[in-house]
Image (tube, helix red, strand yellow):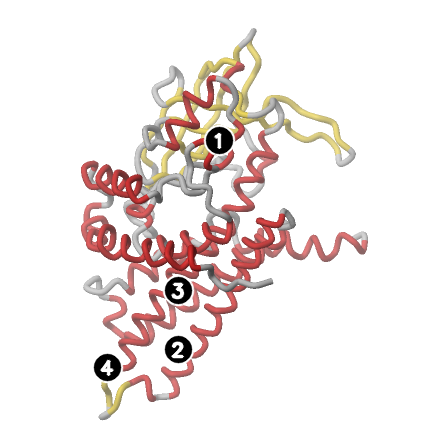
Amino acid sequence: MDFQASDEQRMLVDSLRAFVESELRPHEEEVERNGGVPDELGERIKEKAIEMGFFAANLPEDVGGGGLSYTSLALMERELSKTSFALQHFIGRPSEILLACEGDQRERYLLPCVRGERHECFALTEPGAGSDIMSMATRAKRDGDDYLINGSKHFISSHTLPDFAIVFAATGVDETAKGARKRVTAFLVDRGAEGFDMRLGPRCISHRGYHNYQLSFDDCRVGSGQILGAEGGGLELANEWLHMGRVWVGAGCCGRAERLLDLATEWAASRKQFGQPIGRFQGTSFKLADMATELQAADLLVMQAAWKAEQGSMTTVDAAMAKLFASEMLGRVADHAVQIFGGMGLMDELPIERLWRDARLERIWDGTSEIQRHIIARSMLRPHGA
């Protein structure tokens, strides 16, 4: 396999890098201070992203998206993630599971998201059911031609208040060879629907300005036409999003690690102690060498997963390995960067402390490191009957 970037991909990276430098990074400190992106700024970023052709680049051309390949999308995520999550997500990448929209769902949900007119959130996680989806407590009970949804979701991420939620709820129980399993269905639920409440969740120290929301449902009535995909097919849809999502997390970790490495290298070359740059001391130079080596290894894992996705051969293990190694690599790189900067690494005058705080979340969301290790080990043991 050849991961050498094409001329088109190099142009994409150069354009995105310039966009991040000129349109996003100047606003990082403001977002950090205020805990959010002003509406006017967010709208301006979105409009420029649409003008540049970056918006909805992850969706196919036949619905109005950019139709980028998975490897190009990995490069895109890598560049965008070198700045604040709150800012870069105004360059919309609508959830790919919206491609399951049919009939009037396309005009009501999918196409407005592609045009930047509406924005969705992915509502799967619950207070008592994070990685354990089968512990989901949210229910959707059939009532005539409708469903009544009851339950709650939390840690539902979004850069701005969503217009609608892709809500996963249990609609029954199926008997399988492994015993009874909940039948999970995805619903499209508009903000403002009766019985549906959406509010800001607790403030997180990572990715400030990129909010999490709490959703609650009290006999929220939705029609059967609000089902996304097939009744009982929600788990398959969720897995499609989660698996590629883990690759994008890995790509983003590589982008932030590169920014940290660049900052640390420049500091090590210019900061002097005992009459010479600190980069000449083995304690610092070895850290830089380890950071660069681990970053390259993570990049290769991520690009391999994206390349295999293009071939239709990516497995859950490929995605788990990319997410696991890249997120833990970023944690080590961020910690080394703080150590190289010393006290200044913890001062809010520099972006190091923010990047260090942001790095911690990557080992938790989209499946914790423990879940990724479980996926990998299970695939190794299963052929042996264990």
Q: Earlier in the sequence, mark 3 or mark 2?
A: 3
- Where does residue 9 sit, x and y in percent of width and height? 43, 56
Q: CA distance from mark 1 to mark 3?
A: 31 Å
Q: Residue at x 64, y 29 (%)?
A: 182
User: Is disc 2 placed on a helix, strand or loop?
Assistant: helix
Which numbered circle lies on residue 98? 1
Q: CA distance from mark 3 to mark 2?
A: 12 Å
* Residue receiving disc 3: 257
Q: Is residue 270 above or below residue 49?
A: below
Q: Is residue 114 above or below residue 193?
A: below
Q: Are marks 1 and 3 in contact (CB under 8 Å)?
A: no
Looking at the image, the residue that sits furthest to the front is 7
Q: Residues within 10 Å of mark 3 (few under 14, many from 20)?
A: many
Q: Nearer the viewer, mark 4 or mark 1?
A: 1
Q: Earlier in the sequence, mark 1 or mark 3?
A: 1
Which numbered circle lies on residue 288? 2
Q: Residue at x 51, y 31 (%)?
A: 99
Q: CA distance from mark 4 to mark 1?
A: 50 Å
Left or right: 234 as drawn, with respect to 332: right
